[in-house]
């Protein structure tokens, strides 16, 4: 159930991050626009002051100079009106504005974002006199910033949607794949003891007088079925650790596989180099399962008549090293990590679950390390477990 909670948390996290990005983007864009508008306002205030000072003079040449050399270089829309808001002159208006009505409408839009600057001068007799206003709009840069912010918001929303859709698709696909894979893995695990039991039954039918000789073997296969049931139940619960002899446990695995896979004796030779007396604390049932899966994977990789698989177990300082070497098809280097991912398989009929289960048992449950130590195409593979 925890996995479903994590999936919900990931979706909620994606949504929160998306909202935070949108809010942050809008806030920063508005901050830039506010600063740019303040800069424009300071420029317009300066123009208004220059115009007011020149109006007090009798010489119109200074006013012409301001309009020709200063006002003409303005990069944003600028409209000068009298006190009744009658337009007297303008600069940098959009190309589609031609009539007085259109100019007045555009001026009202500008006033919503930027308050007009009054044109005033001081007279000693009359006092402060306002003779008009400067109306100004946003520069092209501000307009681009506003448009760009909306484009970014749409892009973020699109990627969040893709993230949700992609995550849901991958999760659902993975769930479906794992369910099918678990079913096949269960059948695969049950296949060996069930086939052996069927063989023993047939042997008893053919040799009814030797029933007592085969009972111990049947008991071993029944214990195997019980062990398989325990393995699957332990994968979904808190693992219980015990102290056991790993050397003996691995020798039992090799003995069991050698005796109950008939094709093994014909084409594949299992060899072991096991250091005796290695005691460790772990979940013996799950650890044995992971080692079995790796050995079976090595068996499946052999496509020649004489196959060889060697299993070594050594203890060096505080590390226990298990190496499983085969002379099979090998693994391309680009797939050395992929083979431990759920659903990845180099076999046509494989479901990519055996090695991923082994990886989870060794790395997640036992905090060890599982890796491809070396692999050469058509020469074989060495897989190492470090505990």
Image (spheres, helix red, strand yellow):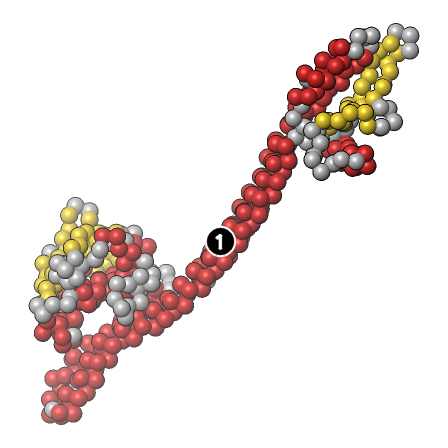
Q: Position of residue 377 (x, y in %)?
A: 16, 57
Asked if 133 appears above or below 160 in the picture, the reply is above
In which image quadrant can residue 143 be found?
A: top right
Q: Residue furthest right?
A: 125
Residue found at x 16% / y 71%: 257
Q: Is residue 172 left or right of residue 377?
A: right
User: Is residue 249 at least partly visible in the picture?
Assistant: no
Judged left or right of residue 268, residue 128 is right
Q: x and y percent of residue 182 in the render? A: 34, 69
Q: Is residue 350 visible?
A: yes
Pick the residue in front: 26 or 113. 113
Q: Hey, which quadrant is residue 30 in on the image?
A: top right
Residue 295: % across, % down = 19, 64
Residue bearing mark 1: 163
Query: Measuring 27% from the left and 58% from the top, which residue is drawn there?
Result: 339
Q: Is 375 drawn above or below residue 57 in the view shown?
A: below
Which residue: 56% across, 43% down?
Answer: 152
- Residue at disc 1, secondary structure: helix
Compare residues 381 and 194 and report the one nearer the observer.
381
């Amino acid at each position: 159930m925890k996995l479903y909670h994590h999936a919900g948390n990931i979706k909620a996290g994606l949504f929160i991050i998306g909202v935070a990005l949108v809010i942050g983007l809008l806030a920063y864009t508005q901050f830039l626009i506010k600063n740019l508008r303040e800069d424009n306002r300071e420029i317009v205030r300066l123009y208004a002051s220059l115009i007011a000072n020149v109006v007090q003079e009798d010489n119109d040449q200074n006013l012409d100079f301001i309009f020709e050399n200063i006002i003409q270089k303005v990069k944003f829309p600028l409209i000068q009106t009298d006190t009744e808001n009658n337009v007297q002159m303008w600069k940098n208006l959009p190309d589609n504005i031609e009539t007085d009505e259109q100019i007045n409408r555009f001026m009202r839009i500008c006033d919503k974002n930027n308050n007009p600057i009054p044109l005033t001068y001081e007279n000693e007799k009359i006092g402060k006199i306002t003779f008009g206003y400067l109306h100004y709009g946003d520069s092209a840069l501000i307009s681009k910033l506003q448009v760009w912010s909306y484009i970014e918001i749409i892009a973020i929303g699109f990627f969040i949607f893709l993230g949700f859709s992609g995550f849901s698709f991958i999760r659902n696909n993975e769930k479906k794949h794992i369910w099918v894979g678990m079913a096949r893995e269960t059948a695969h695990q049950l296949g060996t003891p069930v086939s052996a039991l069927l063989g023993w039954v047939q042997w008893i039918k053919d040799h009814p007088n030797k029933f007592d000789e085969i009972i111990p073997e049947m008991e071993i296969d029944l214990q195997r079925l019980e062990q398989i049931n325990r393995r699957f139940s332990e994968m979904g619960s808190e693992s219980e650790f015990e102290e056991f002899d790993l050397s003996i446990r691995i020798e039992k695995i090799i003995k069991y596989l050698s005796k109950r896979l008939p094709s093994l004796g014909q084409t594949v030779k299992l060899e072991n180099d096991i250091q005796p007396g290695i005691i460790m604390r772990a979940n013996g049932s799950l650890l044995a399962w992971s080692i079995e899966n790796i050995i079976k994977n090595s068996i499946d990789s052999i496509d020649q008549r004489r196959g060889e698989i060697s299993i070594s177990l050594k203890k060096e300082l505080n590390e226990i090293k298990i190496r499983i070497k085969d002379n099979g098809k090998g693994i391309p280097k680009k797939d050395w990590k992929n083979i431990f991912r759920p659903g990845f398989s180099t076999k046509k009929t494989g479901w990519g679950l055996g090695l991923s289960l082994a990886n989870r048992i060794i790395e997640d449950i036992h905090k060890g390390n599982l890796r491809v130590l070396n692999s050469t195409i058509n020469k074989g593979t060495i897989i190492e477990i470090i505990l």
